[in-house]
Amino acid sequence: MSRVLLHATDDPLNNFAMPLERPSNLTFDLPDLLSGFRGVYLVNAFVAFLFAASAPVAIILTAAAAGRLAETDIASWLFGCFFINGLISLAFCLAYRQPLVFFWTIPGTVLVGQALHHLSFAQVIGAYYATGLLMLILGLSGWMRKCMDLLPMPIVMAMVAGVFLQFGLNLIYAIRDGFVIAAPMTAVFVLLSAVSALGRALPPLIGALVTGIVVIALSGTFEMSGAASYTFASPNLYAPEFSGAAMVELVLPLAITVLAAQNAQGFAVLEAAGHKPPVNMITAACGIGSLISASVGTVSTCLTGPVNAILASAGAKEKHYASGVLVALLALAFGILSPLFTRFMLAAPKAFIATLAGLALVRILERAFIVSFKGSFTLGATVTFLVTVANVSILSIGAPFWGLVIGFAVSWTLEKSDFELNATK
């Protein structure tokens, strides 16, 4: 058996109050890894990657369209999403022997799409750097939990619901305006969601994706404007612009989407499967990944919830990491070929992109509404939602930030009992 041991020996650093979780021992067991490249682990890896490479990419295309980004900008963005995050995922899966796959914040991408209406791409990238630095500090210090406790979760999720609402509306508009494509995709999604046996065999979102591809192929609505001029990635390097308005509008909301909306979901699904994700190390990695990926124009890195949930859904817990390694390898390949995939996605009908993105976010929108309005802080959450949906910028700062500020102020003034109750938990 080929086994290389890289044991993490004790050293004086372990005696410091450094909150970063180290792997118990770093091992590379090739036969054990290869044994996980088959059966249910292989299937789960393929399905999980297909999920990441379909609807979330459609959401990026929607955000990029808002900022009128060029095709090369989008390809560079996708290169960071897949290649840089794929490297981080590969390292974490092998080091911790857990399915720890990193991609990018979907709610953050939606926030960026809104911001690009009135901010330049360079200003948004400046906010990426600041967000990455903030998350790195939170991870290294171990302050993440305390910082997340400052904002009530119903208010945070009301902001998320307000941001995502437009995607739900776009799904309805797609069915109205592109019925031939959107209706069959939605029908298949509903069918696979309703019949659990079918949904287990073919995840609803993947079924909608396949249906859309078949309908596009049969209808001849795929408009490829010439062959791709290049296939392999040549990512752009961007000079950031550090704008005060962009910092105020994006840094805190982006960090919240990573830490509270994305990472927290990833931690929950992994712990439910019996894993022990290294919370502080993951937070620090999100910060480092965000700083690196910002250089190529990519939104902040996060631990993905849905992908890791799929990887940890079946099979032996000890083999789940092999599925994570497979996803990471597929992500690296996708990143290298990002210009080609960008060209194909841009050639797809708008109804296909809108439907795929809307179906991907409808369940997240549902959960956001439940968390926001189920229990405490409901008035603050309502105000946050309304301010965010109104999408009115104040002092050149976007509505999501003001939604959080105004909603928190309303709750602090009129729902003090909820703060007191929350403090006793």
Image (cartoon, grey):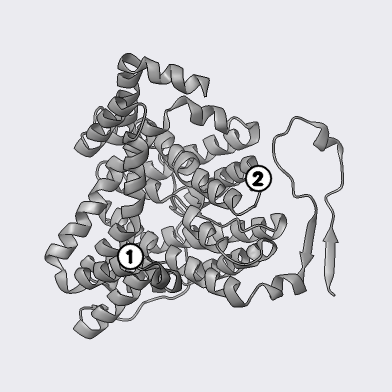
- Counting labels gives 2
Q: Residues within 10 Å of mark 1 (few under 14, many from 20)?
A: few
93 above or below 143? Answer: below
- Whole-Å distance between the Cαs marked 2 and 1? 35 Å
Q: Position of residue 281 (x, y in %)?
A: 65, 43
Mark number displayed over residue 81: none
Please tell me whether mark 2 or mark 1 is closer to you in this view.
Answer: 1
407 left or right of 421? Answer: left
282 left or right of 214? Answer: right
Query: Of helix, strand and loop, which one carries label 2?
Result: loop
Query: Of helix, strand and loop, which one carries label 1?
Result: helix
Q: Residue at x 37, y 38 (%)?
A: 371
218 left or right of 130? Answer: left
Q: Is residue 61 visible?
A: no
Residue 1 falls in image quadrant:
bottom right
Q: Position of residue 387 (x, y in %)?
A: 24, 32
Mark 2 residue type: Pro
Of labels 2 and 1, earlier in sequence is 1
Q: Position of residue 101 (x, y in %)?
A: 56, 57
Mark 1 residue type: Ala
Q: Is residue 278 visible?
A: yes
Residue at numbered disc 1? 194
Of residues 297 and 364, the one nearer the viewer is 364
Q: Residue at x 44, y 47 (%)?
A: 239
Q: Residue at x 50, y 28 (%)?
A: 149
Q: Residues within 10 Å of mark 2 (few under 14, many from 20)?
A: some
377 above or below 369? Answer: above
Mark number displayed over residue 278: 2
